[in-house]
Amino acid sequence: MPNQESRDSQAFRMSRRKMMKGVAAVLGAMALPEKDAPASVWDAFFQKNFRELSKPELEKVIARLEKEYSGQYGKAVKVHATPPIEGVLYGYGLDLSRCIGCRRCAYGCIQENNQSREPQIQWIQVLQLNKERGVDLEEAELYYNPAKVPEKGHFYMPVQCQQCERPPCVKVCPVQATWKERDGITVVDYNWCIGCRYCMAACPYGARHFNWKKAGLPAAEMNPETHYLGNRPRPVGVVEKCTFCIQRVRNTPGRYTACVEVCPVGARKFGNLLDPESEIRYVIENKRVFILKEDLNTRPKFYYFYAT
Amino acid sequence: MKMERVRRAIVPAAAAAILCLAASGALAAHQQEEQGAKKGAAAAHTPHGPQFAVPKPPFSPGIFPCSDCHKEIRPNPTRRDLKDEHTNIVLNHAQGQRWCLDCHDTANRDKLRLASGERIPHEESYRLCGQCHGDKYRDWKAGVHGKRTGMWNGEKQYLLCVHCHNPHDPAYKPLQPMPPPVRPENVRK
């Protein structure tokens, strides 16, 4: 059938391989920034992982971010990249016999760390527990709202990132966008995170939060003192978490975290685990201390204790 | 004050000694002396002023110094319920065992009084509280009881006991909690 053959040779035949190539090319092109995108978008697109940045590269990245945020929020935003202090391993103490569950810490944290107000992201979650049941997380109440706290027969346990020595969230990250720093703080490179949320599934403390939408952060309330690995504004589609106020505590002298300073009952203690004179060492050596979900062997550096 | 003067005299003497004597021996002596001085400062309260940097005590407005009114009044050391003044103060702090003049000094109305009879300023009231609440005093000095602000690896600010606990009614008062987080089912889509 010569007619049929000649028709076949002239007709456009789409093979499966050809189609896949075409789809890949189109999708690849869509992932690239637009043709007339500003240079900074291309810079962000080709930015390396934070830990692979050389000093001049890091300076360039920070200058770019500072420009971007300053324009966005209409004030001079500083992005620091202060490295860990040698000989410091941060530890945190929380006195369950003092905490009254007033949630001042959760809101102090939001202010300091530029969390999204709407949709709401809170790094600290305060649980109300029954005194008779003890630390029974199945019975915990997150949404309690009486006129006055503490309520009779209850105690309160704020939960935030426990800064594990063996963090399961770090282990599961497929792109190494999250890691534990030398001073024990687990951090996220928001520019490297791909938003797969494996770390959220792996964290046994519910300490990681996802940016489903653009952060609702009023420019007037934005804290302009930021750290690259901490409270700088986060893009959509990345995971964030408590960093022990990395922008405060890494300075010499470094301030206490925002939650320590805002707690009205002084239930929160912070210091260097390697310094025998520190408050946190006094707590561990003299008080009844426990760590949350010890059986998981995550080895948190967040110590709940009873001062009385 | 006396110790201060003695120390002031010792420092030049030690400096002279360093110049004259063989360096190593003199340095050792100087260091020892310095250590001794430091220990003294930590142990003693009064000769060097208050040991802890604390903010001003939270007096009710217009009430301090007490001597403004009390210098005209002859102290009446008999235990009684106050009928004319300070009626807003309701003692709810081991009221069966004590009254005003167990903590406020009779002779000097601007001072507090320890059980030993020692008069202390209000800035050192933690020593008065520490007489009974020794365990809390110990934790407070270590920075574990009560709130501290400032630098975790530098200068810290303490609060006095009375900044959180009303000395006449010390139980911590309940607070209104901040609003709870939004329930997932109420999150706007």
Image (spheres, rainbow, N blue to C red):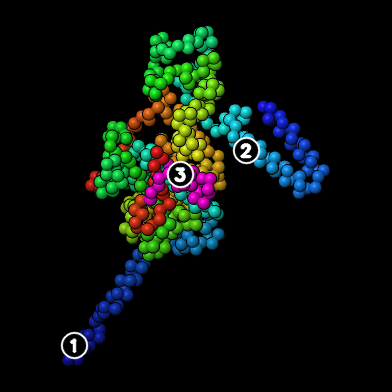
Instruction: For mark 1, give the secondary structure.
Output: helix
CA gap, disc 3 and disc 2: 24 Å
Is residue B79 or residue A33 the one in the foreground? B79
Q: Spot the residue most to the bottom.
A: A1
Q: Residue at x 70, y 40 (%)?
A: B33
The residue carrying pointer 2 sits among few (fewer than 14), some (14 to 19) or many (20 or more) residues within 10 Å by Cα, namely few
Q: Residue at x 55, y 59 (%)?
A: A55
Q: Residue at x 36, y 68 (%)?
A: A28
In which quadrant will I find the C terminus of chain A? Answer: top left
Question: Both on one chain, marks 3 and 2?
Answer: no
CA gap, disc 3 and disc 1: 92 Å
Is residue B102 or residue B168 the one in the foreground? B102
Whether residues under marks 3 and 1 lie with C-beta atoms below 8 angstroms apart, the answer is no
Q: Is residue A287 magenta?
A: yes
The residue carrying pointer 1 sits among few (fewer than 14), some (14 to 19) or many (20 or more) residues within 10 Å by Cα, namely few
In which quadrant will I find the N terminus of chain A? Answer: bottom left
Q: Is residue A106 magenta?
A: no
Q: Which mark is residue B39?
A: 2
- Point out residue B91 in the picture as x, y percentages from the top left corner: 39, 20
The amino acid marked with disc number 2 is Lys
Dot placed on the residue nearer the N-terminal end, 3 or 1: 1
- Point out residue B13 in the picture as x, y percentages from the top left corner: 77, 37
- Report in which chain the residue with disc 1 lies: A
Instruction: For mark 3, give the secondary structure.
Output: helix
Q: Spot the residue most to the right.
A: B20
| Extent of the magenta region | A268-291
The amino acid marked with disc number 3 is Asn
Residue receiving disc 1:
A4
Q: Which mark is residue A286?
A: 3
